[in-house]
Image (tube, rainbow, N blue to C red):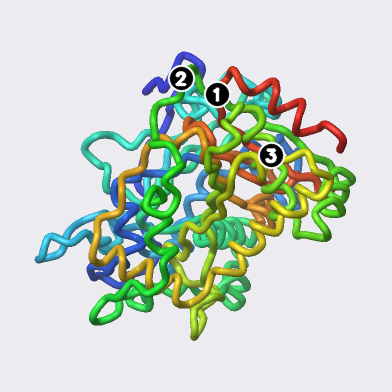
């Protein structure tokens, strides 16, 4: 019996392969996929409270056999997740699709699900509940760990390689896997209504010849060219901490009103950006930047299929002088929300194509710490992350398992259907208290 930690013991580790023969080939990766080759696996965790009955006769809470069978069915259509990262004859990375399978780990713990209902992303959370990708198999696309608590509840930890998919595609897979599990023997009902993923990544092939027409395509990767007052990335001066803040439905409404009717994303992002600038005590004349990954599936001409399976995001952003972003003027929030809105509106076909062409000709800079003048916001707002119901109820909570880059923020719906927003924040410990005060001040 393996021991992840004295708190968690692994009782089973196996490979789940597709339930039917799948296409066997090397899956070509787009330039946007290739920049994720060295980013590794995204660690997330879902927590579920014990439910005494799902209404199914002789049902077993989080029945392992049922979950494996459902995953095997889902992997038939989502076969790249059963593949392995490899290289083609020219040394270019690809996904070797040969039905090798996904890792499936089962563990037990004396802890309870409620112990983690209000927990923060941390190295411990990842170590306990996210399956380890061992050194001799870094090429695995998908691994999951099911941990049973003494209270009967469950933690589902997931590790998905970012080279294979973005968050939109990940949600599509988990929707499908959970639907097959809920259906049980009625899996044909799911198959009939299943929205099939599109695996044609050549839709995002670079133009011939590649040409970078849109100037913002370069600014995303090398901001110092356009914004010389942005400081160089450097390690934070002190410890980085994680915290989750909740903004209620009424507070969201107040922010949107103060932002001249901006969307929830634009209003919350603008407010958080302003709070970060003040809490970090940035110099008024410094240039600060807000960046965020944007889903461009509907922005291309013609649009990508809605269920395009791969990385369909690029980074966009807005910038300004700290004195303007953090201004105490009553209209400042609306002005900053307007900058964010313009960045969203600027996502068009040429920006995407220029970004792809740039990556075809140049190597993207490696992921690193961000300068303290930068804030990066990843929005999962509107994504059905709380609809991952395998037949025993929706998750109590869902979050990134670990998050250690100062200035990185996730926005997630509240999860209780109350219209609130959860803010998963990583920032310098010395600035956290001021950020919290500023976040809720005057809301």
State the residue at coordinates (49%, 85%).
302
The x and y percentages for residue 259 are 80, 54
Residue 428 has which mark?
Answer: 1
State the residue at coordinates (48%, 50%).
68
The x and y percentages for residue 101 are 33, 54
CB of mark 1 within 8 Å of CB of mark 2? yes
Residue that extends furthest to the top in the rendered view of this protein? 6
The x and y percentages for residue 100 are 28, 56
SS type, badge 3 = loop
Locate residue 306 relative to residue 394 in the image: left or right: left
Residue 237 has which mark?
Answer: 2
Residue that extends furthest to the front in the rendered view of this protein? 285
Q: Nearer the viewer, residue 348 or 150?
A: 348
Mark 3 closeness class: few <14, some 14–19, many ≥20 residues within 10 Å: many
Q: Measured along the vertical axis of the image, is residue 180 above or below residue 111?
A: below
Q: Comparing marks 2 and 3, which lies closer to the viewer?
A: 3
The x and y percentages for residue 214 are 42, 71
Quadrant containing the N terminus is top left
């Amino acid at each position: 019996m393996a021991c992840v930690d004295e708190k968690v013991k692994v009782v089973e580790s196996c490979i789940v392969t597709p339930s039917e023969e799948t296409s066997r080939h090397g899956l070509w990766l787009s330039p946007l996929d290739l920049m994720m080759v060295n980013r590794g696996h995204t660690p997330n965790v879902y927590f579920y409270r014990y439910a005494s009955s799902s209404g199914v006769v002789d049902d077993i809470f989080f029945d392992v056999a049922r979950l494996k069978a459902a995953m095997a069915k889902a992997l038939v259509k989502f076969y790249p997740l059963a593949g392995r990262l490899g290289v083609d004859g020219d040394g270019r990375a690809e996904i070797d699709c040969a039905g090798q399978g996904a890792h499936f780990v089962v563990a037990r713990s004396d802890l309870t699900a409620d112990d983690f209902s209000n927990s923060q992303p941390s190295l411990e959370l990842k170590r306990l509940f996210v399956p380890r990708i061992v050194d001799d198999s870094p090429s695995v696309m998908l691994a999951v760990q099911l941990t049973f608590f003494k209270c009967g509840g469950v933690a589902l930890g997931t590790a998905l390689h970012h080279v294979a998919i973005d968050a939109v595609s990940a949600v599509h897979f988990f929707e499908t896997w959970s639907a097959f599990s809920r259906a049980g023997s009625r899996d044909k009902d799911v198959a009939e209504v299943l929205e099939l993923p599109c695996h044609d990544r050549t839709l995002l092939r670079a133009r011939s010849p590649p040409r970078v027409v849109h100037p913002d395509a370069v600014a995303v990767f090398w901001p110092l060219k356009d914004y010389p007052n942005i400081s160089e990335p450097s390690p934070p001066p002190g410890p980085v901490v994680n915290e989750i803040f909740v903004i209620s439905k009424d507070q969201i409404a107040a922010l949107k009103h103060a932002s001249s009717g901006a969307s929830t994303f634009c209003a919350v992002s603008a407010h958080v950006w302003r709070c970060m600038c003040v809490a970090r005590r940035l110099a008024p004349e410094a240039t600060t930047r807000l960046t965020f990954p944007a889903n461009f599936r509907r922005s291309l001409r013609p649009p990508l299929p809605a269920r395009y399976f791969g990385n369909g995001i690029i980074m966009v952003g807005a910038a300004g002088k700290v004195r303007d972003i953090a201004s105490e003027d009553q209209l400042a929030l609306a002005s900053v929300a307007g900058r964010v809105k313009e960045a969203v509106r600027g996502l068009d076909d040429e920006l995407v194509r220029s970004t792809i062409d740039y990556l075809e000709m140049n190597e993207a800079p490696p992921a690193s710490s961000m300068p303290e003048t930068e804030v990066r916001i990843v929005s999962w707002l509107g994504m059905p992350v709380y609809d991952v119901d395998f037949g025993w109820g929706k998750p109590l909570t869902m979050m990134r398992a670990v998050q250690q880059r100062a200035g990185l923020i996730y926005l997630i719906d509240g999860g209780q259907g109350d219209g609130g927003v959860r803010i998963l924040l990583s920032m310098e410990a010395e600035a956290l208290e001021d950020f919290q005060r500023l976040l809720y001040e005057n809301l």
